[in-house]
Image (cartoon, coloured by chain):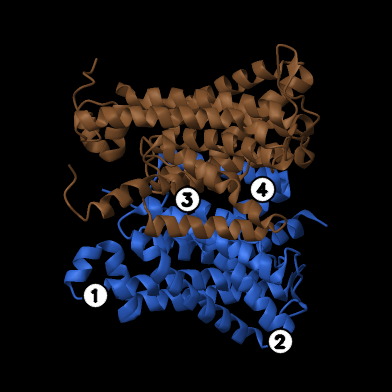
Amino acid sequence: MDFSTLLAQAALNGLVIGTMYMLMAIGFTLVFGIMRIVNFAHGEFYMLGAFSAFFTYAQWEVPFVFCLVIAALTIGALGALVERAIIRPFRNDELSGMIATLGVSVVIQNAAVVAWGPTPRAMPNVVDGVLSVGPFTFPLSRLVVIATAALIFAVFWFFMQRTRTGRAMRAVAQDADTALIQGIRVNTIYPIAFAISVALAALAGALMAPIFSVSPFVGLTPMLKAFVVVILGGLGSVPGAVVGGLLLGLIESFTATALGSLVADILQLLLVILILLVRPWGLLGQKEA
Amino acid sequence: MHDPRLPTTGSGRLPGSAAGRTWAVRLGALAALLAAAALPHFVSNQFYMHMANLALLNAIFTMSLGLIAAVGQLSLGHAAFAATGAYISALGALHLKLPPLLGIAASGLATALVAAILGKILLRLRGVYFVLVTFLAGQVVTLVALNWESVTRGANGLVGIPPISVLGYSLGARAQFYYFALAAFVGVFILLRALMRSQYGRAFRSIAENIELAESSGIDASRYQVIAFAIGSGIAGAAGAVMAHYIRYVSPDTFTFHESVAYITMLVVGGRQTLTGAVLGAAFLTPLPELLRGFVSMQHIIYGAVLVSVLIFLPGGLASIGHRIAKMTRGGRPRP
């Protein structure tokens, strides 16, 4: 394999995991920006999305588009319930809210072990075949992931910018009290924001299920990466999550090709700790007052 | 320094009743200690002894985490310090033939030193940012333990770690180790209690309550936070080393993110405000999952569910139940 093919391969893989990190980080940062909650259960919703796709697509053979819709809706609804029942009591207590999400994470992960067993399951690709451009060949299954993630992000962005609810969410993120005075129902915005956040995680899980395997433990790495991305991009910043996610995916893919993935992981974590110390508000985020 | 007849700043109790209660508490503590010392004579089941040992060690981990929480910071990397201590003492014993007791002391000092240096840098962050950075630092330790195979033997871990011996007398058996763990527990308890009652403890509490106010009153918050973080993490390092010499094995799986979460759970369930809370949490949660032995996932589910329910319904933890009952029986009358 010559050098340019290796680079093209690394770039494609980087984009695939980068889009996944992007979807994870957007949801994570959205919930932090609006509700000031660090959601340690975010990875578990990714895992549930992966299982949802596994059952609907691999076992019941539902068309993949509908699998994505089902995953987003069911897990989004579950997220709204979790917000209502568990997160809401900690509205003014960031630290206790975060500890509560740790508890939620433990419960969901182990409920999945009890229900579906710990063994990883493989899921078939959504499409087969390759796309040849000049000397390069790209598997279609990867390209589909990138395209779908881009589409999901476009829908999300349109929702946030152009709909009433999206605008209300941005207003609450800026200042919840002022938003309340303006007649925005903060109590309905919070569950919606949480539902959208975990639905994005579920979509990431569903998209990645054919590429990685599906097991109750697949959520930890994406969550860790979401932390990393969000620290890079700034807690609460959606553009930061997009740029940070794609960048992290690409950097990771190239360093892993050059140094091996464990070393790449350690370097990445150290880099992030450094950034957190020098610029706690992230590379693109705004300094908090 | 401080007249014992005056009410202490935190409690607001009347001096007379406080003195009466202090004696009751002292007698109760003495009785509990005697009962604990006699335990091995009544319990012959090895498994129950093992549970008692783990509960004592977990209480040490939780109390030391509580010390860091007492300055208003939550460490999600507590198990990483335990792992560091465990590896240091294990490697010392295996390669340098270092006596375990010396190794444990060295582990405690080394992790306290590391924590002091790290704390100087990391404690500039507060609230969720500090939690995130300790979480990530914990992940780094796990990854290094996995990856640095020439020293840590990677995922296989270090086996054949010698048991603790005191004056040539081996504490390998569970009942013997129990006395060591009990002594360590009592030592840490007394140390932390004295610390919390000293001027340091008062500074800690004022920082946790309102850091801006504490700083504007001339308390160097960063310095006290570094002190609490270094002592708490050093105790965790030493206790991690004790654990390594007890189970005679250490691997990257011995102290992970999940253990850090377990210590937080014990602290929250027992009660974040007091030292007794940490002990109650460890005593309650260590044996609880054993009701469902062999079904690990159900244990974790119970841990998570207990954690969330206590946070929502009993924010003061088990330690606050007494207060709650007292409040209810007094029928809402203002406290004397």
In primary-sequence order, the first of circles 1 and 2 is: 2
Per the model, the C-alpha gap separating discs 2 and 3 is: 40 Å
What chain is the brown one? B
Q: Secondary structure at mark 1?
A: loop
- State the count of labels: 4
- Residue A255's disc is 4
Per the model, the C-alpha gap separating discs 2 and 4 is: 39 Å
What percent of the width, then of the height, locates residue A5?
76, 60
What chain is the blue one? A
Q: Name the residue that disc number 2 marks.
A: A60
Per the model, the C-alpha gap separating discs 3 and 1 is: 31 Å
Q: Name the residue that disc number 1 marks.
A: A184
For mark 3, name the chain: A
In primary-sequence order, the first of circles 2 and 4 is: 2
How many other residues sit within 10 Å of disc 4, few (<14), some (14-19) or many (≥20)? some
Q: Residues at marks 1 and 4, common chain?
A: yes
Which amino acid, by three-letter code, is at mark 4?
Thr
Per the model, the C-alpha gap separating discs 3 and 4 is: 17 Å
